[in-house]
Amino acid sequence: MISVLLSLVALVLFIKEKEYKNFKLSAIHPADLSLVLFNIVIVLSVLFGPMETINWKATLNILKISIWYWALKYLILRYYSIESFKKGLPLWSALVLTIAVYTIVQFFTGLDLAKTPSRAVAYGQFFRPVGFFSMALTQAYNLSQGAILLLPFAFLEKKKSLSFFYSFCFFVASVAVVLTLSRGAWASFFLSLSLLIWLVGSKKQKAFSYLALFAGLTLMATNSSIQGKIMDLFNPEEASQSYRLTLWQAYFEMYKDHWLLGTGWRHSELFLPQYLHKIGEPDFEFLSHAHSNYVQIIASLGSLGFLSFLTFVLLRLQMAYELIRSSAHTLFMPLGAGFLGVQLVFHLGGLTEATLLDSEVTHMLFFQYAILGAIHKWRYNIRGDLS
């Protein structure tokens, strides 16, 4: 609801201030053009796909989020500056800390402040925390994206009090991510974390951080619920693993039959039963999305959709990397590193979970994309490359 209202506010301002007169197609960043292309392929996939009846509500969800991204970027450029993010970071940290503490409390008690009975599902002696969402995975990926942005500032902030505060908030949030009992989120978060430590930490910070990371994970593994999740990784009969392999096989067969534009965005699930029958799994009951962004996209949007998505992903990663290498402003390096970590969490997690279909997680990513896009434009303005 907030994203729709903000989009309307941006549109009214854009028209009222006659900003459209200054609009130049040549000024659009290639990353934004790739997002336009991705949305075009989504529409084409349903218009020319095998479905007779189109679910436009599901189809246009990414378009709605994309419009919100452009609206938010416009509002940020209009009302904020690069210094605004330095002033706002303590508030962001406090918010991450509050959500992390709530997650930890919910793990031990099952307390749900939004719903009765609690949506936190019992797991052994404890609960899988969902925060204010309906699924633990949503909570895990949103908290991961919010937390990892703090790590470069914990390393690079010159004020010791602020550096300690960012470090403390990040540590508590890391504990909370583990307690969501979401293995895909664990893997994406700690792989991204390891890369950021290597990227921005000094020699002493790297040594201490890797040692603390190893000690923390070892300590967490003593919890019975976490032990169960870890041991399931080595069990080939464990439901989530066997389900994924079957789904991936069926969706890949779908791609082979519809290799150019796929079966249509969010329509691939409707074709799943016939392809399960095709691979010899007619009694498979877990009818679901592909549980992987990449498998989902290649089946739903075909080769064109996969290439447009990959282009969009790589260009955004490049934007973050360019900020890391920029010396035009002291905030560019930590913000670039943080936004690189945010994207890695989302895309690495997308290997085993369709994070792109979770609108709460996708809104979080595109919210930070908007900030990244605005900061990237400010970078060029500071360097004098753009007027």
Image: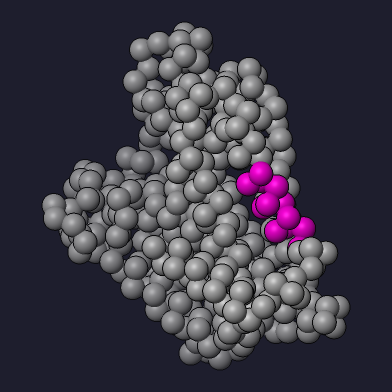
Residue at image coords 61%, 74%: 15
Q: Quadrant of residue 91?
A: bottom left
Q: Viewer-proximal residue, 289 or 110?
A: 289
Check residue 102 for magenta coloring: no
- Above or below 260: residue 293: below
Query: Total of numbered circles in the picture?
Result: 0
Residue 342 visible? The answer is no
- Above or below 12: residue 224: above
Specify the quadrant that holds the C terminus.
bottom right
Q: Quadrant of residue 381?
A: bottom right
Name of the residue lying farthest toward the right: 385
Is 126 left or right of 355, judged from the image as shown? left
Specify the quadrant that holds the N terminus.
bottom left
- Above or below 9: residue 32: above
Q: Tell me which segment is drawn in magenta.
A: 29-40
Q: Viewer-proximal residue, 239 or 263?
A: 263
Q: Viewer-proximal residue, 309 or 186?
A: 309
Residue at image coords 83%, 78%: 386
Residue 98 visible? The answer is yes
Where residue 37 sits: x, y (%)?
A: 70, 47
- Above or below 82: residue 139: above
Q: Viewer-proximal residue, 205 or 322?
A: 322
Check residue 33 for magenta coloring: yes
